[in-house]
Image (tube, grey):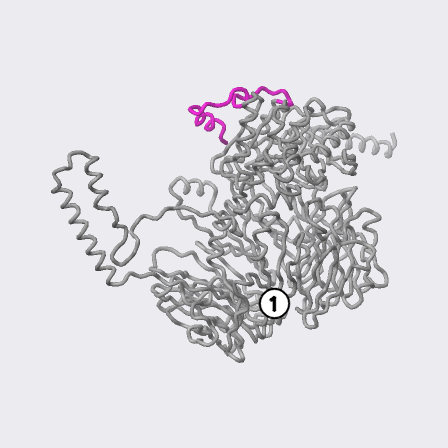
Amino acid sequence: MSKITALKGFLTVFLVSLWLVHLAEAQDTKPISWKDIPSWKSISQASVQFSKEGKWMAYGMVPVEGDGEIIIQKVSDPESKKTFPIGSSANPTISFSDNGRWVAYKEYPKEKDRKSASKNGGKNLKEKLILVDLENDFKKTEYDNISSFSFNGKASTHLAINLSKEGSNGDAKGSDLLIVNLSNLKSHNIGNVFEYAFNKGGEHLAYTIDAANKNGNGLHLYHVNSGNISILETEKATYRSINWTEKGDAFALLKMVEDKAFKQDQGKLIGVKNLNKPEIIVYDPKKDSTNFPKNFTISPNRKPMWSEDLSKLFYGIHPLVAEKKEDKKEEKSEEKSEVSESDKLGKIMADTTIKSISDLQSAIAKLDSGKTKTSSGKNEANKPDMTIWHWKDSRLQSRQQVLENQDKNYSFWAVYQVANKKHLALQDSSMKELQLLPKQKFALGSDIQTYELDINLDGQSYYDYYIVDLNTGEKKELFKKFYQPNYNSRPRASEDGTKILYAEDGHFFVYEIVSGKKINLTNKLPTTFVNVEDDRNVEKPMNAPLGWSADSKYVLLRDNWDIWQIPISNPENAINLTKNGKTDKIRYQSRFALDPDEKGIDLSKNLYVRMYGENTKKSGIGIINAGKSALNPGITKLVWEDANINRLSKAEQADVFFFTKEKFSTPTEYFTTNAKLENPKQITSNAPDASKYAWSPGVKLVDYISDKGDSLQAALFLPAGYEEGKSYPTIVYYYEKLSQTLHNYSTPGFSGTGWNPGVYTSNGYAVLIPDIVYTLDDPGMSAVWCVLPAVKEALKTGVIDEGNMGLHGHSWGGYQTSFLITQTDMFKAAAAGAPLTNMVSMYDLIYWNTGGGNMAIFEASQGRFKGGPWENWDSYLRNSPVYHVKNVQTPLLMLHNDKDGAVDFTQGIEYYNALRRLKKPVIMMQYKGENHGLSKLENRKDYSVRMMEFFDHHLKGNDAPKWISEGIDRLQLETHLEKRAF
């Protein structure tokens, strides 16, 4: 035998062995169960941090329930990772110093300690701060019982740590602040610190003192390099709301002084600049009888701020409310009243005609009659607890209740001009909103009060807009009754603050503030910027603009496919930067903003754009090269895959780039690369336990035509262990258009709706998610016209077991589920979460989470009806599940909670009782005190398990648990729940 033949034989045996090992490993995997999920660990996306020089990465790896850890690693070497325990937190706090040498993170109480504390009345648990030296073998320094922390910006020389307040210290609001010198880790302790903030450069730390009885309260400035402290202000007052300028060359704050004549403190404004020799500007409205209204004060509810040129200070003002006090005469009258009560008691005791309790009650009533006021005139009767609902209320009383605190704390913008020491009010109750524009020369004001009632009734939004001169306070009308079909039409300012971009009647315009000139940007372009796919009942809704250029000479707009660069001076010379979007059915959706400090879009730099293939579901990142757009428009694909590509970011101080990639069964992973996104390298290992379990082997796209002729798609997710030619029980899930989720990864967990597609496919279900588009006046029928054709087309793949199909949706999807089962018998089981079931009664109910009425939602938003029920009875009745309830043959599991603030609980009760009256198979789960979805972990666990048990019984033939087959009596419920808890 030759050496080559022997080598071939060895390689064959070796490869077969590898295959057998892989097969054995595959056979060892199992479906993930709900009891496996509490310990499931994955990357907390909100915690992911990169150091600014691009060398380090840190993130939390946390379980659904239990204790997690922080992982710190070099970007260039994922194997360098170090793991540190952090206790129990879903979104741990992590921060790098700007120079990348240090990382600090919070360590939280452990899960067992949290549970123990909860059982013992909520014992105060403490958090630690862990400081890690990345240049000294991950050396740790711990600080106990901390509240917050901050590195000193660019300098990266110090760390400030605010400790938690311990024990009783009178009315003091402050606590200890440690200033840690990172060169030697020596600490400087400053007591009674209430607020603190470094400037951006890190050379200065402003902080306020709040001590017992306000003794020693004041404003201090810590000079970081020298360690010197300047006491800038001190008084028996509360100093708060420190706000540095972006450059870090000045800051503003408030001084609130108690005034016993009013319910609120009297506010004073402080501005500090020239930090090396601090110049302090103080404005006290009480001393300004000429310009400042006597019945107002500076509000603590809006942070003050400097203008960019340090010529003005902006702040909020609000009305004062007098403190009610009883005068001495009233005190005397109350004393007399007490004597008279004694006299009354004597009279009753001396009355020999009283022989029974009823006689006594009559005698007391006679003595009390007519005595409801004291001699001071104050009404002593008990007040009713009630609300007056009036048809002229612009906002429902329920909405007013939701916004009560916001309304109480509302403040109006004002400005203090430093040079002439003058206060100007910039708005009042006739203009409730005000936005300061860049460079602080002008402001954009708006008001809806004239139209608010109608907006809340029919959902069609109108605004009055104004331009306010910040030097004079002069208000000039910009638009009267300006129609906003959606948020994208609203006016937005250029980066130099002199121009406004807005949309009207299907076109984008620019308004030049100084000249008053209006320029139509889009009327001569061969495309439309109207979102023609928005099927809600609004007129000409626009696609979202990408924004202004940094030099304020261009705007970047999106039509339904491409990105256009439009010069303000010559709009007809607009350039289609991406060119091929419409022809290739690629949507250029958004621009990645890589500089957190950018002011507008810098067209001298390359633009990175997210790409999405409408028909292929591919996604990726493209680049529009800087400076070539006019001569050579077009985009270069850098990443383009059958995956979900997203979250492009860049290290602030280096050309190190990061992005994420995920697929339906592949967890979200981070990759690092260069500016051209070449040869990306995976740097994370998400979901470390994933290999133990069985996952969907892939996805399919199903193209279909709706009954109304729309070309749509459905995402079909294959079950774990899928074999070609074999059909599987299937859950059909929907909301509106969702086929774009084909490559979205769903972390195993307990959602607020019980639904997790990855868990279902792991357990042998196929999942079909079809698109739904809508015809006005037929939201329910639109689901029929879209979902049923999708299912019929998907059946042709052979994946779906036609005899074992289930439906599930929540909220709007729950509505469509409850409606579909009145129109078809093709599904064997259905689960509807928080469904709308009676469109007539639902129209007039309240969306309790906001306090607003549902009518605006029905007429101009998701409901998609034209007018109210009395104008459109046939449409409302035709699309209401409860009016077709006699047709239902499908067993239904409902989730509807008694405190649902979106879809009123009565909607669930109506449908449940109607089905029950007809003896249809229905079970309704109600979790006490829960809102539109489940928030408590124990409830999320419970419903997730029950919903799968329901489908397992009906679609897989598993034995029905007692709660499905018979129900649970009230007296047995406690024992039932105890047995199922995990």
Instruction: Name the foreground residue: 208 vs 329.
Output: 329
Report the residue at 67% width, 37% height from top: 779
Tell me the quarter of the image containing the N terminus: top right
Q: What percent of the width, then of the height, locates residue 206?
A: 49, 68
Q: In this view, does 36 lie above or below 321?
A: above
Instruction: Name the foreground residue: 488 vs 90.
Output: 488
Q: What percent of the width, then of the height, locates residue 787?
A: 71, 33
Instruction: Name the foreground residue: 333 vs 587.
Output: 333
Q: In which quarter of the image is residue 955?
A: top right
Q: What percent of the width, then of the height, locates residue 294?
A: 43, 70
Q: In this view, does 919 lie above or below 934?
A: above
Report the residue at 58% width, 28% height from top: 893
Residue 186 visible, this orientation: no
Residue 605 lies in the magenta stretch: no
Q: What percent of the width, then of the height, locates residue 715?
A: 73, 36
**What residue is shown with label 1?**
443
The span shown in magenta is 954-982
Instruction: Name the foreground residue: 672 vs 951.
Output: 951
Residue count near mark 1 (Cα–Cα under 10 Å), binned few <14, some 14–19, many ≥20 = many
Label 1 amino acid? Answer: Ala
Q: Is the magenta stretch mostly helix, strand or loop?
A: helix
Secondary structure type for disc 1: strand
